[in-house]
Structure formats: C-alpha cells, structure tokens
Amino acid sequence: MAQLPQASAEERSLDAVPNAPDRHKPVGFILRLAKALHTYGVPAYELETTLSACARKLGYGLQCLSLPTSITMSLMRKKEHVQTFVIRVAPGEVHLDKLRRVSDVAHQVMTGEMTTAAGADELHNINQARPSYSMWLVLLAFGLVSASVGRLFGGGLNEVIGAMSAGLALGILTIISARIPLLAHLLPATAALLSTLVAYVTALWLPGTEVYIAIVSGLIILLPGLTLTIAMAELATQNLMSGTARLFGAGTVFILMAFGIVIGNHLAEVLSLQDVAMNHRVTPLPAWTEWLSVLMGSIALVILFQARLKEAIWVIAGGFIAFTATKYAGLFFNNAMTAFIGAIAVGSCANLVSRFSGVPGATLVVPGFIILVPGSVGFKSLMALVEHDVVRGLDTAFNMTLVGISLVAGLLISSLVTLPKASAVQELDTEL
C-alpha cells in the first residue's frame, strides 16, 4: 500500500546529473515530466501514453519503455539524430497532490497554455515542495488506518487498540527509516518484527486480543496490495516487463514481512508472550462501527496520500464507494465477483468525477482500492506456506490471484483514467 522511503528531492532531480539536458529545452522538459510522472505513482501504460502525446505535440517521435526502476526513451526528430536516454528511478510513491499538479503541467504544455521552460520550472517547484501535512499528523494517520482496518477485518475493541498500537509503531519506524538508508531497505522485515512484538505486548495488557488481526492490520500500510494490482493491470495491457518486475517486487516485500513475523513469533515464544494470545474469541462491535471505521480510515488516507484538503471529500467518497459496493455485493457473490463489482463502481465514479470536475481519478481510485486490493489475502497465503500448510497456502494464493484479476478486469471495463485531463490528452494524440 505505502511505498518505502524515497530519496531526497535533490537526489531525485535530473539537475543533479552532470551534463543532463537543459531543463528549459523541450527534451529536458520531456525527461523531467517522465521522471515526475513515474515518481508520483503513474502506471507504465498511463506514463507511456501521456509522454507519447506530449512528445508528438512538441514535434518529437517517442519510443518509451517504463519499468519500476528505470525509464528508457528514444526521441526522434526530422534531420536530427535519434537521442536515447535512460533514467534510473525509484519505485513510484503515491502523492495525490503532486500527481495532480504534474498532470496539470503536462496538459497545459500540450495545449499551449504553458511553455516547456515554464513547465520545467513548475516541475522543479513540485519536486521541491514540502509535505502537505506535519509529521505528527502523518504518525496519527498510520494509527487510524490500522485501527480502521482492524475493525473491518472483524476485530473487536481489543483488536482495534492492538492494531492502532502496531500502526503507530510502524509510523515511527517509517519516519526514522527515512533518515537511515540501511533501515529503509530492511523496513518490511523490521516493521513486521516490530508490529508482531507490539501486538503481543498489547495482548498482554488486554487479555483476549486476537493477535493475528492486530498484526496484519498494523502492517496494512506496507502491504503491497495496490502494487500487486497495478502489476496485474500492466500485464493485462501487455506491459510485460514492467508488470513482471512490479509483481516480483511485491512478492519480495511479502517474503520480507513474513520473515519478520516468523522472527517476532519466535521472540514472543521465548518471552512467554504467546500463551496470553492463544485461542481467544473476538468480542464483536456494533455494525455501525464499520461505517465509522471507513470514515476514519479514509480521513487518515487523505494525510498519508498527501491529498489537498479541498479534495478530501473525494478521497473519503472513494473509500465509501468501495466499501458499500463490496459489502452488499458480498451478500450475493463470491470474493472475486465482489472485487469485480467494487472495481467497476470505483472506476466508473472516478471517471465521472474526473470528467466533470477535473479532479484526478486517482483521488477516488487509490483509497477505494485500499479496501479492494488482495494484499492481506496474499499475506495470509504466504504465512500459511511458512507454517508448512501448503494446501491452505496455495488455495489462498489462488483466491488472491482471482481477486487481483477481477480488480483489473473491473478497472479496464470502467475505462479508468488516472490523469485529470486524460480525455484531452487522447484527443490531442488522435489529432496528431
């Protein structure tokens, strides 16, 4: 769901690369637009489509290959040699406000409302912009999202408290890891270990806590369910290299987290913490608390995904649309069909909002898919395999795959467009 800590703005900038093309020239702008779109979470198929339209508008032919860790582009112009560039990038992070601003720059340059020089300067300003929310709000958001998911996973009050504690611990660790590169690379395993120990300690103080719910809910921010779904979407749109790389990247995060939980369980056993957390029955909460959880979780996602306050209502709407669709569809259909209906509902609403209000479709889609994505299902599958329950692990993995395919099918059918001016981009591309 969340990405690992990224490099600083200066390290991400092409201006720090010796002899890089001038930012104020068309080629320099195209390169920086490509890196900006990739950095803020645009999938390969959207990135390549947008860059091709922009390059053609500026008089260039473009062949582009986008991967999770690199972008390769060949720019062609009459009477000039072909220019090929390779940009090393980190896997994209979800930042809704910066994604909206970068998308607006791309549209304005393509429509002639902004020069490439002004567009490059604006991209630089976006890259250098400070976080929209303070650190303590981000930390609180970690705890609220975990607590909300703990309730949606069927937890009672004890599980919600345990999940919030684990989420807060994860938030602190994530903030610290942003300053320690080595810890950043080990974040999935370290976070899983910490969340496991925090969940067991919480169960010690709150007897009757179902530890597994608290652990998975506490880790929900790092579960790569959204990455997994994007990978399947890229595979479905024939972006095979990007989709395969992203798929294996998500699998690596799952493995690291499973390793961290295994170590955490062993430490809990050594410290005699497991005895207080075994064979407990969850005390259910009233049904209305589910809706409250969706509300609080969606508000927290506004902060975690750095959305603008005036667009917060759409983030919250995305969460409620996904939850409502899956809750009532689940009364009649299995998990895969429920995910399919939920994806169509979220994607269609995102298209309508994007087309009539100019709000990026991702503002609804990203929070909505947090509820829909099969990250927790994949995690359960891996944990079953770690526990040598091969049959249950493979069965769960198969269910996760079906859910992921259903989500992608729903996205494609709803004709999801993540860029706010995508319809205009497509019109420009057709004219050219």
Image (cartoon, rainbow, N blue to C red):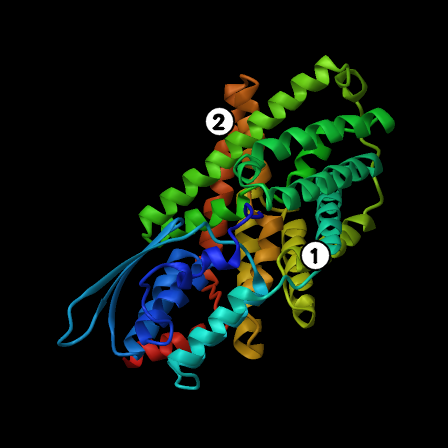
Nearest the camera: 262 or 332?
262
**Contact? badges 1 and 2 (CB < 8 Å):** no
Above or below: residue 193 compared with residue 301: above
Within 10 Å of disc 1 (Cα), the crowding (few <14, some 14-19, many 20+) is many
Q: Does residue 169 appear to the left or right of 416 in the view shown?
A: right
Does residue 361 appear in the picture of this structure? no
Name which residue type carries label 2.
Leu
Q: Which mark is residue 298?
A: 1
Above or below: residue 175 compared with residue 321: above
Q: Quadrant of residue 389?
A: top right
Name which residue type carries label 1.
Ser
Label 2: which secondary element:
helix
Residue 6 rendering spot, x and y as whole percentages? 52, 50
Most extreme residue toward the left is 79
- Residue drawn where x is 56% and y is 25% of the image: 259
Which mark sits nearer the N-terminus, 1 or 2?
1
Total of numbered circles in the picture?
2
Residue 109 rendering spot, x and y as whole percentages? 40, 80
Above or below: residue 348 compared with residue 270: below
Q: Does residue 124 appear to the left or right of 168 in the view shown?
A: left
Label 1: which secondary element:
helix
Which residue carries the number 2 mark?
394
